[in-house]
Image: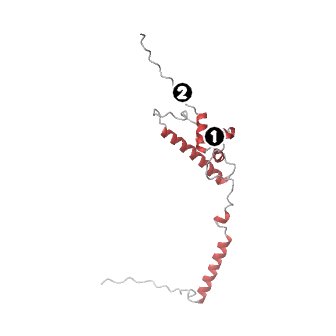
Amino acid sequence: MQPQPERCVSTVPQPTWHKGEKFLQHMRLAALALLATAAAIPTASRAQPAPRSDVIDHVRSVSDLAAVCDPAWGGVPRLEAIAYCQGFLTSAGQYHALLHPAGGPARPLFCVANPGPSIAESGINFVAWARANPNRANEPALDGLLRWAQTTFPCQQPAPAARASRPAR
């Protein structure tokens, strides 16, 4: 049989306040202090300003897209709006590129040079176009974006096919 190691026994007396009424009083005081502190600290929902009614969160028309691409509001809503605009323009451009690949059977609606403008420049230019064409304000956003792209990035007209000459009779 192996010898058992000696155990250290503390000679420091253990507190006894955790046993009985004193313990309950301390716990009640601690809980009240915690509640008072929690009530004094503003929560995230209380600290946030009321939602603005002029912030556009769903783009339907050309005017909506123009407002999102050049937002009048500031802070986080401005950053979200610019990101929405850039995502809208990017996805429309990528979808168009998939529908009209180079050398494909369908002629593209617009032809962006390589290198093209940045997505931020495109957003700013679209806003300028939308302001210059208020008659398009209520059209669907994608229709207006494609009209702008066709105006801004026209494709060269294909050269007419050369007619084969017929031998004289």
Give the quarter of the figure containing the N terminus. Answer: bottom left
Which quadrant of the figure has residue 32?
bottom right
Q: Farthest residue toward the top?
A: 169
Q: Residues within 10 Å of mark 2 (few under 14, many from 20)?
A: few
Report the side of 22 relative to 134 (left or right). Answer: left
Q: Residues within 10 Å of mark 1 (few under 14, many from 20)?
A: many
- Residue ID at (61%, 34%): 151
User: On screen, 120 above or below 167?
Assistant: below
Q: How far apart are the two marked residues, 1 and 2, measured between alpha carbons?
A: 24 Å
- Spot occupied by residue 106 in the image (x, y as percentages of width and height): 48, 34
User: On screen, 59 above or below 1?
Assistant: above
* Residue 157: numbered disc: 2
Q: Farthest residue toward the left?
A: 1
- Spot occupied by residue 4 in the image (x, y as percentages of width and height): 36, 83
Q: Amino acid at mark 1?
A: Phe
Q: Nearer the viewer, residue 73 or 54?
A: 54
- Spot occupied by residue 33 in the image (x, y as percentages of width and height): 65, 77
Where does label 1 land, which residue? 126
